[in-house]
Structures are given as C-alpha cells and as structure tokens.
Image (cartoon, rainbow, N blue to C red):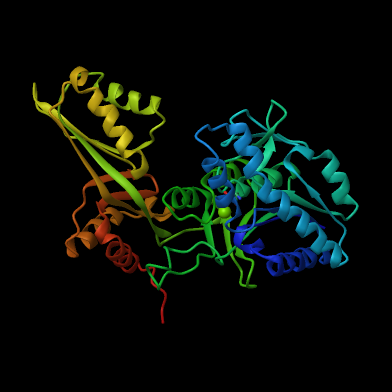
Amino acid sequence: MALIVQKFGGTSVGDLDRIRNVASRVKAEVESGNEVAVVVSAMAGTTNQLVSWARDIGPMHDAREYDAIVATGEQVTVGLLAIALQNLGIDARSWLGWQIPVHTDEVHGAARIRSIDTDVMRARLATGQVAVVAGFQGLAPDGRISTLGRGGSDTSAVALAAALNADRCDIYTDVDGVYTTDPRIAPRAQKLDQITFEEMLEMASLGAKVLQTRSVAMAMRHNVNLQVRSSFTDAPGTLVVNEDAIVEQEKISGIAYSPDEAKLTIQGLPDRPGIAAAIFGTLADSHINVDMIVQTAASEGQKTDITFSLGRGDLAKALEIIESGRETLGFDGVDAQDDVTKISVVGMAMRSQPGVARTMFETLAERGINIEVISTSEIKISVLIAAEYTELAVRSLHTAFGLDAED
Ligand code: ASP
Ligand code: MG
C-alpha cells in the first residue's frame, strides 16, 4: 500500500463534470489499495475573478482581507469533490488550510509554508478516508487565513507530500507532461519522459509554466517523487527525478522562453568600486528582480555601461529609480527596451558536452538574429533577443538540438 498525493489544477476542476472525472481518478487510486490525499485548486477563472473583485472594491488594499476573499475558490472545490467522491461510494472529507493546519509565515498574499500538522490527517487516511485538501491556503501566525501566491496549490501539494512522506506526488494538469518546448509555437515539441529537478527549475523559472517554480524547489529539497500528468488522458506523464536517476543524457532537455522581459542600459557610468552595488541595491530595495547583467570592460579611467534584464512589469519603476540617482551615480544616459525575449537552452547534458553555446549562437546567427545579452549557468545558456524573433529562434534551436519529433 502506498500513500499518494494527487493534485488537480483549475482546468481539471473547471466544472461539475470535470470534478466528477477527478473523483473517478481518485477512486481508481483508492481501489488499487492506496491511501490518498487530493489537493485541489479553485475552478479555472475563479481566482482571477476573486482577485479583481478584491482590487476593484476600492483603492484601499488590505492583504488579510485579500486572503479572506481569494482563498474561497478552493473552499468550493474541496466541498464539491468530497461530495462527488461520496457519491461514488468513497469515504472522503474536505480540509481547509486552517483545519489541518498548514502553518505559514505572516506574509499575507505571498505566504510561505512553515510546517504542516499531519497527525489527524494520517489517522483518517489510515481508516481509508480520502483527504480532500484546499490548495493555495494556510494559517498565518495571526490566526487568519493566508494564501501562497498565484499558482500556489502546486506548492501546497508538494509540501503535503513531503510532510506525509508520500510515495508519490502526481500533479494532474491540462497538458500531459513537460515538453521540450512550448508546443504552441513549436508543433514538433515532444513530451519528456523524465527531467531532473534542476532542469525543471530552470524551465519553470524561464516561463514553462507547468509547475510553480517554488514547488519544484521544494520537491527537490525534500526529494518528493513528482510526476506531471494529464487529468484528461491516461498517457504516462513526465517524471521529475533526481540527477542520479538519469544515467547519461546526450541531448539537451529543452528550449524555454520568457516573453515578458525588458532591458535597461545605463550608459557612461564612472568605473569605480560601489557603482554596481549602488544601482542593484536600490533596485532590490524596491523589490525589483534583476536577471541578466553585463558590464562592459572599461580601460583605465574610462567610463563603462551596465546592461541588465528585468521583468517588463518592473521597467517603468526601475527607470524612475535609476533616473532619480543620476546625480549621485553620475552616468550619461539610460536606454530602455521593452520588446525583448529571453530564450534559453536547458540541459544537464551541457555539463559533459562542449559546443552547446556554439550551436546556439551559430543557429541564431544563421537566422540573422542578434544576441543582445548572454548569461549562463552550469545547465543553461540564455540570450536576450528582439521579441519579434521569438518563434523563429525557438523553432530553429529546437531543430538544431535534435529535439524535433519525427513525423
Ligand atoms: N487558485 C490559485 C490560483 O489561481 C492557486 C492555484 O491554482 O494554484 O492562483
Ligand atoms: Mg497551476
């Protein structure tokens, strides 16, 4: 007998028929003799609606009340799923975050899970009862409901799997796994049978939004057996595994892209210690995440340029901050561009295989695509390019790295 955590996302519980479909999936797991805890999201579209109501009611924003509002979506789906299961003859009970409880920190709206009390739930699971758990929510130290940030029910599921020491955590979604790239722009993308946590982390943070990035990091830390699969088909999904589980990888794993990027260049900065610290320090103080950074080398006594990329949504604020420091920083000018995309080649294979960068740069050069910024990690090479070339770049790289599916 195994203990399984299943997680169903918003589209999987999008209407009553779909909730009934989820119930039969859960039933199958119970009938194979397993103990099952199911984590669910709100019905597709519900959380968006709740968030906009919370915003539109008036100019005041109170994060505690925001949480009281947006956590309701999951309250509806756990109740419905529990009833759907009972109608199939399965003993099931719903659990809200505060009932378990899932203890979080005090950051309402973007809380982090601190611990989960599983004693009572374990006892119930042992009697064969299915626990239907509301994702996305917890209990803050102030005794009020907290939520984990958008997409947080993936994190709820992984955290619960870790706390219960579950044998598997199956994430059911509307795609049947993790792909070599986005199939919507590269129709020859293929489903990966497995991917390592490290690669998945890169893919997730680079815009392949199958799993919330935080949930992948947490699964890696706690060694949770993670699987992404479709709630609409029986096709096997993608296993997210430890590095040692993969014998040797010859191919790179995927091409990720992140469209909502912007680029900022500060021109003619004095080349002296403390300049970068001053710039990135003030940006960090305003919670602006900076991603790729390049500084041009300056010869003795010369000025230097610093270029960095950041989320498009932060560009206006970053510009304002930089401009306000013009006097103290003493630079000549700023150049901002908001029509750039970050394209990344990701794979453990590049640790053992030389020439990945070369293939990437040559492929882009052959298509006449200019590279504006480059950054690398051990298992990833990213470039910033003009947004208009996104599809061409993704498709060409997908082909160049031998990832295209055969006809
Ligand atoms: N319902 C929440 C959201 O839409 C949490 C989730 O679906 O993961 O962000
Ligand atoms: Mg989701």
User: Looking at the picture, does residue 117 appear above or below residue 180?
Assistant: above
Which residue is located at x 59 percent, y 45 percent?
A: 152
Q: Residue at x 76, y 68 (%)?
A: 24
Q: Position of residue 88 (x, y in %)?
A: 84, 68
Determine the residue positioned at 72% across, 28% down.
Answer: 143
The answer to whether residue 38 of the structure is visible from this angle is no
For the point 86% across and 62% down, which residue is it? 86
Q: Which part of the image, by quadrant, shows the C terminus?
A: bottom left
Check the image and name the residue furthest to the front.
58
Residue closest to the eye, 405 or 141: 141
Quadrant of the image where one finds ligand 2: bottom right
- 147 or 176: which is nearer to us? 147
Quarter of the image with the N terminus in it: bottom right
Q: Nearer the viewer, residue 123 or 310?
A: 310
In the foreground, 149 or 344: 149
Question: How many numbered badges does the structure rendering display?
Answer: 0
Return the residue found at the far bottom. 407
Q: Position of residue 377 (x, y in %)?
A: 36, 43
The residue furthest right is: 127
